[in-house]
Amino acid sequence: MILAVFRRRQPEATIRALYGTIVAQARHPSFYLSYGVPDSTTGRFEMIVLHQTLLLRRLRQAGMPDHMGLMGQAVFDLFCRDMDHNLREMGVGDMAVPKEMRRMGEAFYGRAAAYDHALDTGDERALAIVLARNVLGEASVPDEARRLARYVWEAMRRLAATSEASLAQAMLAFPDPDTIAAPVGSKSKEATP
């Protein structure tokens, strides 16, 4: 009986640890100081969505067992509960919370699809365009968006190298954004097609 109680708590602790790592990484000051991410509620939401998408992408890769997909769903469910809690803390009324949650859900799925498509093509420029639009709110592709695209590729590389056993123990490490070099070239914004 005690073993059953321990087993039920362990996954919840793992889920909370994974989500905590996502949130902590999304709040890394460098994103807001040198990557051009707006230091706002929207900017922080965008960074959580980005990191959450990267983890969920890893958990549903070919060859991963079904329970890893279930873990991904549990992390997403915790994200939804956290967003609901944050809305209420910001003073959004009970009647408006479902509408805001629907809007956030649509934003999450739209961005996840756009990131997945750009990552599936392997095109760093396409990823930079998507990041510029979604995370930075830019119609052009500034150097910061290209740097963020490089960060995402490095995060994907690290996640791919993280074993199933490590993920199951919530041993998740994203790259230090300070170690990602800024793109070489002009400081001007590149027009999107």
Image: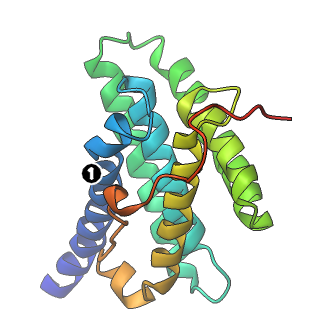
**Could you tell me which quadrant the C terminus lies in?**
top right
Q: Residue at x 74, y 67 (%)?
A: 122
Q: Is residue 22 left or right of residue 74?
A: left
Name which residue type carries label 1: Ala
Left/right of residue 127 with respect to residue 155 in the rendered view: right
Which residue sits at x=60%, y=36%?
142
Residue drawn at x 56%, y 42% as measured from the top left? 143
Element class at badge 1: helix
Judge whether residue 27 can be spotted in this image. no
Residue on which the image places disc 1: 24
For the image, the number of numbered tags is 1
The percent position of residue 22, horizontal first and vertical second, equals 35, 55
Location of residue 166 (image quadrant): bottom left
Identify which residue, 63 or 43, lies in the foreground.
Answer: 43
Q: Tell me which colouring the rendered structure shows.
A: rainbow
Residue at image location 68% in from the left, 84% down from the top: 62
* Image location (x, y in percent) of residue 96: 48, 12
